Amino acid sequence: MRYESVVDAIGHTPLVRLALDPAAPVEVYGKLELQNLYGMKDRVARQAVLEARRTGALAEGAPIIESSSGTMALGLALVGAHLGHPVHIVTDPRIDPITLAKLRGLGCRVHVVEAMSGAGWQSARLERLAELIRDLPGAFWPRQYSNPDNPAAYRALADELLADLGHIDVLVAAVGSGGSLSGTARMLRRALPDLRVVGVDCVGSVLFDQPDRPTRLQGGLGNSLVPANLDRTLIDEVHWLNDREAFQSTRELALEQGLFAGNTAGSVYRVLKDVARRAAPGARIVGIFPDRGDRYADNVYDDGYWERHALGTMPAADTPAEVAAGTEVATWSYAAQHGAVRPPRRLLFVEANTSGTGVLALDLTRRLGLEPVLLTDTPERYAGAEESGCEIVVCDTSTERALREVIGERFARQELAGITTTSDFYVPVVARLADWLGLPGNPVQAMADTRNKARVRELLDAAGVDQPRFAAVRTVAQADAAVERIGLPCVVKPADDSGSNDVLLCHTREQVLAHVEHVLSVELNVRGLPTARTALLEEFVEGPEYSVEMFGEGGRQVCVGITAKTVSDGPYFVERRHLFPAPLADADAAALRGTVGTALTALGVELGATHTEVRLSARGPLIVEVNARLAGGMIPELIRLATGVDLLEQQLRAACGRPVELAGEREGFAGIRFLAADREGVLTGIGGVAEGERVPGVRRVVLTAAPGRAVRPPRNAYDRLGYVIAEGATPEAVVKSLDEAERALTVELGPA
């Protein structure tokens, strides 16, 4: 097979059926990760370095530093040297001479610590690494123990296994940094939910509640620290082997299978044979063999080394003893992990919307038995967030790199149940973070596409989905050329804003060009994020407007319902009222559902709620906007009142990989009326709230604007002052309640 570079050649390793007892009715395979150029962690080095370069964490030519005693060091030396980065490796005296020679041959600067600290060799190495960080400004530390790029690197390995075998019953892998087992198992479980996962550790490692023994001789697995990348919730069973058992089985692997491997592969081999012995007939079992044996010639394969360390006198077991989790062991033993590990509890929110749903989501998370964590750069933006009891982490949310840093530093992977947002602006970065963490989420490219309305238009056009005529422009000159084709009047709007902000109906060429110039001049949106600097010119379509609320789960799109929307006539388009479900003829409802379903398929949206705005024109449904997130404007609350389906809860459940329930338990109607000023001024108060709340059918009156605020007739959703929610048995009853409540309320203004 041909590759353009040594970095491209990483992975693609052989899968070999092992010659075990021919009478055993099972299939056992070894994934020969030792066939990578330097070992399995070549994958991690490539993933971590390339992602750091993509996000800006690693500048061109900047140094790379890491603590490693083996294959991670070699992988970084390989990738770093190829991409032009000096590599510094911190290690300890246990490093074998072959690895040391390879590192120096590849141009690495190797720093060998001289003595253990109180927590063993690992902590001593980390202390030296901290000194290097101070001495090498701009250095990138891959942090193999806590960087989710470590487990993410093994998605390709999982894909290779699925491509070669299709179905796997049991995966057996060693645990050191936690990346290979966690990353491979997590991705395999998406396709194989019944996969059984067996972890292999060593006696004297703390990874699974054993006491630390820094004098253990095994390398490549086990640890004196518990890495954040280790996700114990994925593991069904864990085995421990002592040094003699591990070294002996490594020699057996060479004798019996012809594989000259390291002690990590040897340990996996011993457990593989035991798992095969206990497996049901027809089972297909795979073990990951990470390391080749050249590093171990002077210990595992050296009789003199055995004598010097009295390995022959160490007790050994021919079969594993089953023990309770937490039991201290000295020889080969295993324990079931079910119930031994607390399930993931934290649901991360990257910012939220400010229309009410965002804070409701934080409250609801607790009712689901989860702990909400809000990552935000402006906590005061969310009234009621602090009272919800959620953890608030104040941090930079403007870049993926900044969010990666705070998540990697603060949270162990097995703590995290999911990551989500209720804000348009953060949908793409949440998709990238979910992908990075291996959490449930939508395809990264689909979320990037749907966030840019110009890209949505292009993709829908290519798929033949009905929509208004359009032109995406990045200069005023392009807009001038597009006016004739689009026609007048036309709608001009930013390609990536929200809440109807800067959406304007233009009747003349001069209006179009002036507004395009304004849109293109806006460099940062309301959240301080860079804009696309792109304007959309769209045909103005007349007809009633609806939003179709869909929910993706299990590879299909379910229509939860259709909302009738009352929007101001222009030149600004601001939603003034919603009614759910929309009173529609069956044929019209079917046409709306069909058009939106085709659009979502074309865009590649797969998981969770979507909110698609459609005009029912004379020529049929035309897509206005596709929003790959939960509807705002309190529409989820209307759906809950009308049907009993808590769409917000289902969205949170989907973000955590939990099953969802979209079937309604009742049939009613609900609506919302937004309060607004009819002229410019300063808000002094809103009267009649108590009277409005007493109107039959009204559920609540909520004020979102405080006295003293400058107000105006709405030009976008941010200009609204509050809302009234009502429910009833018919659409007419709901509208009547909303009208009566609105008449009872008075917006009191002082001079502008």
Image (spheres, rainbow, N blue to C red):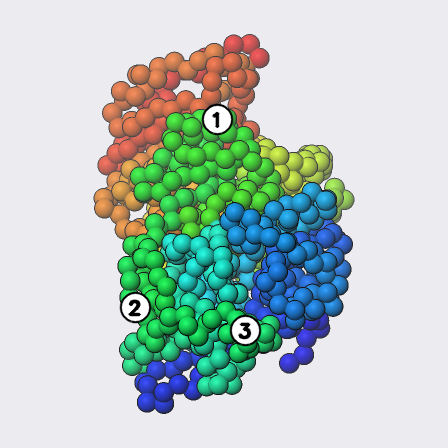
Can you tell which quarter of the image residue 331 is in?
bottom left
Left or right: where 176 falls relative to 109: left
Residue 12 visible (yes or no): no
For label 2, the residue is 321
Badge 1 marks a residue whose secondary structure is: loop
For label 1, the residue is 720
For label 3, the residue is 305
| Position of residue 150 measured from the top left corner of the image (x, y, whole percent) | 55, 58
Badge 2 marks a residue whose secondary structure is: strand
| Position of residue 73 measured from the top left corner of the image (x, y, whole percent) | 63, 62
The residue located at (43%, 87%) in the rendering is: 19
Badge 3 marks a residue whose secondary structure is: helix
Q: Is residue 350 above or below residue 601?
A: above
Label 1 packing within 10 angstroms: few (<14), some (14-19), many (20+): many
The amino acid type, in three-letter code, at marker 2 is Ala
| Position of residue 317 measured from the top left corner of the image (x, y, whole percent) | 34, 73
The residue located at (45%, 43%) in the rendering is: 348
Can you tell which quarter of the image residue 390 is in?
top left
| Position of residue 59 measured from the top left corner of the image (x, y, whole percent) | 72, 50
Instruction: Depth check: give the residue in front, 257 or 190.
Output: 257
The amino acid type, in three-letter code, at marker 1 is Arg
Q: Split into 4 quadrants, where in the image is the C terminus? A: top right
Q: Earlier in the sequence, mark 1 or mark 2?
A: 2
Q: Quote the CA–CA distance across marks 3 and 1.
A: 78 Å
The amino acid type, in three-letter code, at marker 3 is Tyr
